[in-house]
Amino acid sequence: MAPLLLDDRSCEAEASNATINRDLTALAQLLAYGELWGVCVGNPAKTFNRRLATREKRDNRSLPSREQMEQVASRCPPGFGDLVRFALFSGRRQNEICMMNWSGVACRPPPNRACT
């Protein structure tokens, strides 16, 4: 097997902790296959304590206010605003909304509105 060569550009920028964690996960998986096939003994990437060395930083993000969410939904084309409101208030991702079935919906209409 030929050695992996890195060019000079790959060493110029610092990698984020998230990148290091993803690389360690890939390396641990690769070494696990090596162990399975009998070409490696041990898997140091699996036993490495990532939490101490590569703790990921969390961004201080604030959620939009109800007024800001309504502002976005009100600027949508007719009919699409309700879908945007549902996504915002349910916290569901696009693919989760697209995969929904009526059997998974418990419809409780808001006051003065009918559930159709």
Image (spheres, rainbow, N blue to C red):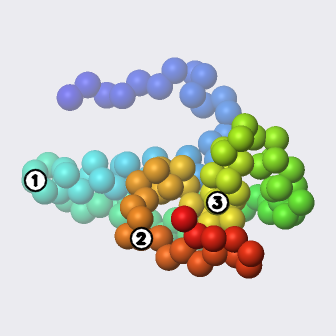
- Res 61 quadrant in image: bottom right
The x and y percentages for residue 16 are: 64, 47
Identify the residue at horizontal 60%, vertical 31% (top origin).
11
Q: Nearer the viewer, residue 41 or 86?
A: 86
The x and y percentages for residue 7 are: 51, 21
SS at mark 2 in the image: helix
Estimate the spatial distance between the alpha carbons at disc 1 and disc 3, rounded to whole Å. 52 Å
Q: Quadrant where the C terminus lies?
A: bottom right
Q: Which mark is residue 38?
A: 1
* Three-letter code for the amino acid on which mark 3 is drawn: Phe
**Is mark 2 in CB contact (under 8 Å) with mark 3?**
no
Q: Earlier in the sequence, mark 1 or mark 3?
A: 1
Few, some or many C-alpha atoms within 10 Å of disc 1 (few <14, some 14-19, many ≥20)? few
The x and y percentages for residue 15 are: 62, 42
Query: Which residue is identified by label 3?
Result: 86
Identify the residue at horizontal 55%, vertical 55% (top origin).
93
Estimate the spatial distance between the alpha carbons at disc 2 and disc 1, rounded to whole Å. 47 Å
* Three-letter code for the amino acid on which mark 1 is drawn: Gly
Q: Which mark is residue 24?
A: none
**Is mark 2 in CB contact (under 8 Å) with mark 1?**
no
Identify the residue at horizontal 14%, vertical 49% (top origin).
39
Against 77, is 68 above or below? below
Q: Earlier in the sequence, mark 2 or mark 3?
A: 3
Query: Which residue is identified by label 2?
Result: 104
Q: Earlier in the sequence, mark 2 or mark 1?
A: 1
* Three-letter code for the amino acid on which mark 2 is drawn: Gly
